[in-house]
Image (cartoon, coloured by chain):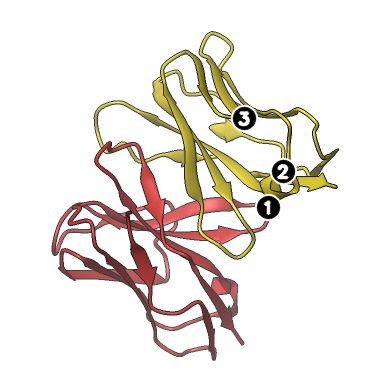
Chain colours: A yellow, B red
Amino acid sequence: QKEVEQDPGPLSVPEGAIVSLNCTYSNSAFQYFMWYRQYSRKGPELLMYTYSSGNKEDGRFTAQVDKSSKYISLFIRDSQPSDSATYLCAMSSSGGSYIPTFGRGTSLIVHP
Amino acid sequence: DVKVTQSSRYLVKRTGEKVFLECVQDMDHENMFWYRQDPGLGLRLIYFSYDVKMKEKGDIPEGYSVSREKKERFSLILESASTNQTSMYLCAITGDSSYEQYFGPGTRLTVT
């Protein structure tokens, strides 16, 4: 079992839909939870991060962490074609090197 | 804005050639990383460096070496390129908050 599991998709939704992207993990030491967005032929860019449990909102994006279930989510409201990208979750533990463990990424397609 | 640049966006090399991929950052940060990204496998860490002349193996170091002679520059070397090293190579640095990674645009390497 991989430390971080993420469904690769693709996930195809109509413009305006609410999108839910998810990752599960097995390492209870993870404390930092990140979401990266990667457009085609580009490097990933950090979208949001959350420390420990709880929710964090930034515009149309909401990141949610449930440590008891070892489950994290990224919600995108009012999705736009420009949101079409691959979304990678990443997690790291506090202390030590902070080197993140990445999910394999979910491909999202938002069609007009 | 954080700037991480990579020497080439696209590279085509022949089997057995020595290949140099260079990464340059303008953030004066200690930590630099090399990943490869393949469909279905996600991001895999090859090597990382905490400081000048220091290097640590990641998850898949076989067939690769690295060099860090100056703080801003981290080079990935394929001593004798093979077709299974055809991949997207991504350089990253950590930001002020160690959990954040900033990625370069990537180098798509094809070995024929």
User: In the drawing, what numbered circle is on residue A8?
Assistant: 2
Q: Residues within 10 Å of mark 2 (few under 14, many from 20)?
A: some
Where A70 sits versus A36, above or below?
A: above
The image quadrant of residue B92 is bottom left
Tag 1–tag 2 contact (CB < 8 Å): yes
Q: Marks 3/1: CA distance? A: 28 Å
- At x 16%, y 63%, the residue is B71
Where B35 sits versus A23, above or below?
A: below
- At x 45%, y 18%, the residue is A28
Where A41 sits versus A27, above or below?
A: below
- At x 53%, y 32%, the residue is A3
User: In this figure, which residue is indicated by the disc labeled 1?
Assistant: B40
Indicate the secondary structure of the residue bearing disc 2.
loop
| Marked residue chain, label 3 | A
Indicate the secondary structure of the residue bearing disc 1.
loop
The image quadrant of residue A96 is top left
**Mark nearer the N terminus (3 vs 2):** 2
Indicate the secondary structure of the residue bearing disc 3.
loop
Q: Marks 3/2: CA distance? A: 22 Å
x, y percentage for residue A22? 66, 28
Q: Is residue B72 left or right of residue A94?
A: left
